[in-house]
Image (cartoon, coloured by chain):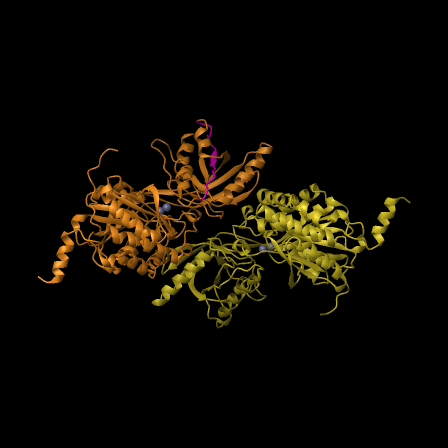
Chain colours: A orange, B yellow
Amino acid sequence: MNMRILAALAALTLPIPLLAQHDPAALQQMALADDTAYGIVEDLTTEIGPRLAGTDREAAAREWAVERLKAMGFSNVRVEPFDMKTWVRGIETAEVTAPYTGAMHISALGNSASTGPRGLEAEIVYFATMADLDAAPDGSLKGKIAFVSHKMTRTQTGASYGQFGDVRRRGPNIAASKGAAAIVIRSVGTDYHRNPHTGGTNFAEGVSPIPAAALSIPDAENLERMIRRAARDNRPVKMKLVLTPRQIGTTQSGNVIAEVPGSDPAAGMILIGGHLDSWDLGTGAIDDGAGVAISAAAAKLVMDAGIPKRTIRVVWWGAEEVGIFGGKAYAEKHGAAGHALAMESDFGAGRIWQVDFRLPDSAAAMQTKIVEALASMGIGRGRGVASGGPDHGPIVALGVNAIDLQQDGTDYFDLHHTPDDTLDKIDPQMLRQNVAAWATVLGIVANDPADLLPKAKVAE
Amino acid sequence: MNMRILAALAALTLPIPLLAQHDPAALQQMALADDTAYGIVEDLTTEIGPRLAGTDREAAAREWAVERLKAMGFSNVRVEPFDMKTWVRGIETAEVTAPYTGAMHISALGNSASTGPRGLEAEIVYFATMADLDAAPDGSLKGKIAFVSHKMTRTQTGASYGQFGDVRRRGPNIAASKGAAAIVIRSVGTDYHRNPHTGGTNFAEGVSPIPAAALSIPDAENLERMIRRAARDNRPVKMKLVLTPRQIGTTQSGNVIAEVPGSDPAAGMILIGGHLDSWDLGTGAIDDGAGVAISAAAAKLVMDAGIPKRTIRVVWWGAEEVGIFGGKAYAEKHGAAGHALAMESDFGAGRIWQVDFRLPDSAAAMQTKIVEALASMGIGRGRGVASGGPDHGPIVALGVNAIDLQQDGTDYFDLHHTPDDTLDKIDPQMLRQNVAAWATVLGIVANDPADLLPKAKVAE
Ligand SMILES: [Zn+2]
Ligand SMILES: [Zn+2]
Ligand SMILES: [Zn+2]
Ligand SMILES: [Zn+2]
């Protein structure tokens, strides 16, 4: 029995300190000199571009992804397909017709109904906030176009999106249930460009979908000014909308999976990734080309440094934007068993500045190790509980541990779901910083002796 | 003969010091507390919006302008109409069809020909600079779409526009003369948004116009990446263009004129203004709603302070964007006679930081007075020769004096001729600073004893 076999046996059976080749400082140094991630997002946005869930373009992205992940040296590269109901965009124009005139920049929200090609012209009823729309009497919007505005302030954490995103997520259903003919919202965003922010919405069972769309923020503010002026002498403001999106029925999406096999399958795997689908207006660079790139580039750095104890499973998720269909399909198929930890990158390519955890007390030593390793990069300990990211929500709900490397989102909602989500918005140096933080954490969690396997879920 | 008549006679005949009510410090203080200019640009962009030269919307703007200038208390408010050949935008789409796919954001340039509604699909031939296009052999572009890129760096003075704007002004004519089927250019701009920068182009006599359009800068850079990749294995890059603009023949435009009558008509008038027409993609806030607002608000401040010696003539010019047709019509009709000085605001709403002059030596004392009064606002003396602004070019060429209050243009070409030229881009505080600088200069030049009347033009 020679020394190499002995060492291999030791690795399989004993709690061992962090392998030298997965030392945080070494991985960070490599990451900061590595443009693998930028190459992935550059190629994806240039060769594939927009890749709306359920469409041919998302399928093209999966094909591209399988080839790329194989070329990077990952094992067990495969697609796990699933079916979904698919919505596609059509023509979209908006024009104020009275008492002023003006073409406005607009985009339909996912699941919007169509106005038909001849469009719909109606009076605007203005609501300053979502609460005002909620308070409108039933039937009061009959035949009208509801216009819901809001103020949204930029935040580093992105927390304002949860609250103000409600206008998009819930507004159309409420307006439809009160009889509105259509709804336009002020884009859920923080920029001042003529770029509408799209995104998904949903109508409850029994509520007939209506045309629903977002105005760019300069257009929404111009419409507000028109409404204030027209109100002075009680003139109605009218808008003509042409929106022709449609539901195309059931099509296929899928999750693309690749692995770095670990030396100790019994220790559970580390599930990481980002989502491969994107909205169709931009090229999906920050949402979420960056995320698939960061997670895979970090996994490759760890893989190239040496065999980790735990398997690292990289998933490039399908159909996140339209309902986390990929994450749900995965959780249904695989359950929580064998998953030690989940981490996702889906908040752009800004600097990682904070880390949050969802770990058992028994992993306290590992957590401290991570906090210390990230502190050397200026990344602080957050006070939140990690979510694991949107695609991992379903499996985290089943009891899987999670770590969130929080990106600076100050500018994220300038670009989110707009035509402006393009490669030029990514700073290669920031992307390397992300990969360095990810590789640091991966190097630790993939080798730590803590028991990370999910326990039977207890009611909370 | 009472004292009032004596004083009036003195004012008419003697060199007098700057009237107390037109004291720079007093005017500056009033300007910095006055939102007249913001009100003008807010109302114009909200109630009228885009106002392409020669169209109904420009006519609506003139009607609005006459009413507004009368309401402000100006005298002799009138329109001087002129005829022009008018071009209007149609559908505009661009899509890469091989070897990758992708819809691109594009806008036709003024005077672009149409592809017809079925469009045009052809191979792209790439030129990194205008000089490269100039060097292409005659006939080498036969049936191809020329794509001309460039690098343009932001400058405070806007000087880079002169040089790089050539790609737009001259590129289409050169491409057409070399047999190209169409030309697309990288937008002449400094931003990274999916907003194409439109603008005028011209084809020489005997050169048949071709479809000519600008790609947004993120799209142009994506196309460059596609071209580099495709070149690796010699694959052609193809684009499908649909552009349906058209020439609608002769229509009417006009200059809107308003005056502050001076006490000494023989001293010549001060000609000031901005242009009322705008490109059709934005609402013409910074180009040039700001300019019409700044010039008129400053004239009103001087008017309200007391009767100036010289008449101030405010002109809101028509059809500047498409060939300075208003400025040319005015110079033809009025000539230089009786014009003491010309000043225009047509470079956005950024802080005024510098002043340039084109004055006779005999006005040296007045110039010093202006430099000193502006120095108190932190505005320095430039080394350039004032142009008087684009609309005043024709009359300055006839020998009229000029002063340029230079605005900070660092961000101007982020917005110039794009859909993003909207009210929200104007900082009300900066606009007030502009009005303060303008009122300062107007207060001096409208009252100074210097002989400013144009001399018979001497060949230079
Ligand atoms: Zn996302
Ligand atoms: Zn998203
Ligand atoms: Zn202009
Ligand atoms: Zn212009």
Q: Quadrant of the C terminus of chain B?
A: bottom right
Q: Quadrant of the N terminus of chain B?
A: top right
Residue B128 in the image: x percent, y percent?
46, 66
Position of residue B439 relative to residue B220, above or below, is above
Residue interval drawn in magenta: A138-154
Q: Is residue A175 left or right of residue B269?
A: left
Residue A296, quarter of picture? bottom left
- The residue most toward the right is B1
Q: Nearer the viewer, residue A401 or A273?
A: A401
Look at the image and tell me whether residue A118 can be seen: no
A453 in the magenta segment:
no
Residue A118 in the image: x percent, y percent?
46, 41
Residue B427 in the image: x percent, y percent?
57, 47
Which secondary structure type mostly characterizes the magenta part of the structure? loop
A149 in the magenta segment:
yes
Please count the marks in the image.
Answer: 0
Residue B129 in the image: x percent, y percent?
49, 67
Q: Is residue A257 left or right of residue B133?
A: left
Q: Nearer the viewer, residue B8 or B44?
A: B8
Q: Nearer the viewer, residue A262 or A162?
A: A262
Q: Nearer the viewer, residue B244 or B129?
A: B129
Position of residue B304 relative to residue B89, above or below, is above
Looking at the image, which residue is at 76% across and 48% down? B20
Look at the image and tell me whether residue B377 can be seen: yes
